[in-house]
Structures are given as C-alpha cells and as structure tokens.
C-alpha cells in the first residue's frame, strides 16, 4: 500500500476515534451527524474520499451503540 493511502487511512481512523469520543455529548442523530461532518471535514476526508452512505451508517451505528 502506498504511503499516501496509509496516511489517509490513519487520518480516517483518527477521525472516527474523535467522533466516538464526541458522540457521547450528542442528544440527536442530526446533532451527531453535524458534529461528525465537522470532524471529518477537519481531516479533509469528505471531498471525494468517503461515500455519504458509509459515513452516515457509521455515525448512526456509533450513535445507536452509545445509547445501549
């Protein structure tokens, strides 16, 4: 795997970790999606890297799991 792809995957992992921490403070899925979008945008991962459905599914899953 290329160094660039490894770097992008590391950024994605860091973004998901940050979302996982911050999602605890969200009270609605809409709030969680907005927060996650801001996090991923900060890593420049929303413009062409990640499918919207995959992003929304990941956030939704995290939000649901934190409720349990």
Image: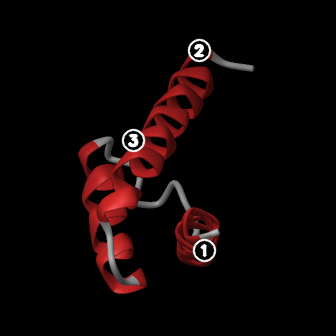
How many angstroms separate mark 1 from mark 2 (CA)?
A: 34 Å
**Is the residue 1 above or below the residue 63 in the image?**
above
Q: Earlier in the sequence, mark 1 or mark 3?
A: 3
Residue 4, located in which quarter of the rendered image?
Answer: top right
Q: Left or right of 17: which side holds 27?
A: left
Spatial CA span between label 2 and label 3: 23 Å
- What SS does tag 1 mark? helix
Instruction: Tell me how far mark 1 sits from mark 3, CA to CA.
Output: 17 Å
User: Which residue is under mark 2?
Assistant: 3
Residue ID at (64%, 65%): 65
Q: Which residue is mark 3?
A: 18
Q: Are marks 2 and 3 in contact (CB under 8 Å)?
A: no
Q: Quadrant of the C terminus?
A: bottom right
In this rendering, the answer to whether 7 lies above or below 26 is above
Circle 1/circle 2 CB separation < 8 Å: no
Which image quarter: residue 58? bottom right
Q: Report the front residue among 19 and 56.
A: 19
How many residues crowd mark 2 within 10 Å: few (<14), some (14–19), many (20+)? few
For image coordinates 51% across by 22% down, the residue present is: 7
Front residue of this view, candidates 36 and 7:
36
* Residue 64, disc: 1
Q: Which quarter of the image is occupied by the N terminus?
A: top right
Instruction: Give neighbour class at mark 3: few <14, some 14-19, many 20+ (Cα, 10 Å).
Output: some
Mark 1 vs mark 3: give the one in front. Answer: 1
Q: Earlier in the sequence, mark 2 or mark 3?
A: 2
By what rule are the colours in the image chosen?
Answer: secondary structure
Q: Position of residue 22 (x, y in %)?
A: 34, 51
């Amino acid at each position: 795997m290329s160094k660039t792809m490894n770097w992008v995957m590391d950024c994605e992992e860091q973004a998901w970790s940050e979302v996982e921490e911050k999602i605890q403070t969200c009270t609605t899925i809409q709030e969680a999606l907005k927060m996650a979008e801001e996090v991923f945008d900060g890593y420049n991962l929303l413009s062409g890297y990640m499918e919207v459905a995959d992003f929304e599914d990941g956030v939704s899953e995290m939000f649901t799991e934190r409720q349990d």
